[in-house]
Amino acid sequence: MTTLRTLRMAAVSAGFGRDLEEDFAVAERLIKEARAEGVRLLALPEAALGGYLLSLDGDDAGDDPGPPPLAVDGPEIRRLSALAGEMTVIAGYCEAAGDQRYNSVVCVTGDGVLGNHRKVHQPLSEDASYASGDRFRAFDTPVGRLGMMICYDKAFPESARALALDGAQIGVCVSAWPGSRTNAATDLAEDRWKRRFDLFDRARALENQMVWLSANQAGTFGSLRFVGSAKVVDPGGEILADTGVGAGIAVAELDVAQALETARRSMGHLRDRRPETYALSTPGAPSA
């Protein structure tokens, strides 16, 4: 049974496409399912509202107009907020900001938007469709202080570390992470890009001693075959719940404050940092 100190949280592996009405129907079903299980924090994948790109090669879009651009203060995000109600819900979308488009993720409750992140690191040809974000910031929510990132952002240790140093207790990474484009494994569970996906999730949790939620698209979209593998990871890098490569919801319950205290008690990775030693030398300068 959930106590007042524990948090029941979940990360989703599911497919989402261009049709917003279908996407909202999937999101509503998942939110209802999570609510029935007592979940208070739910992470939906990258591009959950409007779908991702058909290809990362930049030449397979055809007549596809791309994801529908949505304003962070627009009716679609308000609709997501209404569905969230008392829950804290995180979902990816294409953000319209003036003439720019961003690959973004938003965090909402029934009270409105709590946080928004624009994807900073763009793989392959993604920069042809989106502008790049320029920061990582944590923010307070009813379930604790969160930090968000999107897909390729987690390949860079600095991303999660910036959030941890800003006080994030929980890191949430939403993805549309596909299987390998070359030498693809017949069985996605054996795919090398899936292994990287899982390694990054566990490493980011462990090195920052934080709780980690990882949501991902599932199924296929355009030329992409997504690896699923939504999961919840504890501050020691141990996977508490995992969907595998198919669609599903990974649900776990944890006393977040106690888990962080226990993980950081003896060897505190944030506490024991030596930032004065990490500065890069000037190119061409002799080392000391």
Image (cartoon, rainbow, N blue to C red):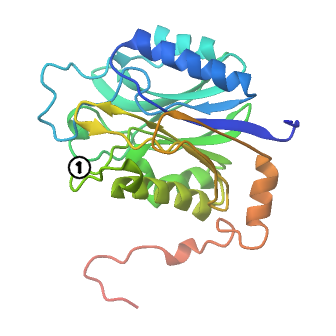
- Asked if residue 216 shows in the view, the reply is yes
| Residue nearest the observer in this picture, 210 or 177 | 177
Q: Quadrant of residue 64?
A: top left
Looking at the image, the residue that sits furthest to the bottom is 288
Q: Say which quadrant the C terminus sits in.
A: bottom left
Residue at image location 80% in from the left, 47% down from the top: 255
| Whether residue 52 is situated above or below residue 82 in the rendered picture | below
Which kind of residue does numbered mark 1 sit on?
A: Arg
Q: Say which quadrant the N terminus sits in.
A: top right
Residue at image location 55% in from the left, 42% down from the top: 243
Give the left or right position of residue 38, taking residue 109 as reference: right
Rate crowding at label 1 as few (under 14), some (14 to 19) or many (20 or more) other CA atoms within 10 Å: few
Residue at image location 28% in from the left, 51% down from the top: 180
Give the left or right position of residue 38, taking residue 12 as reference: right
Residue under label 1, please give it: 181
Residue 81: x percent and y percent? 59, 16
| Whether residue 116 is situated above or below residue 184 in the rendered picture | above
Helix, strand or loop for disc 1 = loop
| Whether residue 84 is situated above or below residue 6 in the rendered picture | above
Give the left or right position of residue 35, taking residue 258 as reference: left
- Asked if residue 74 shows in the view, the reply is no
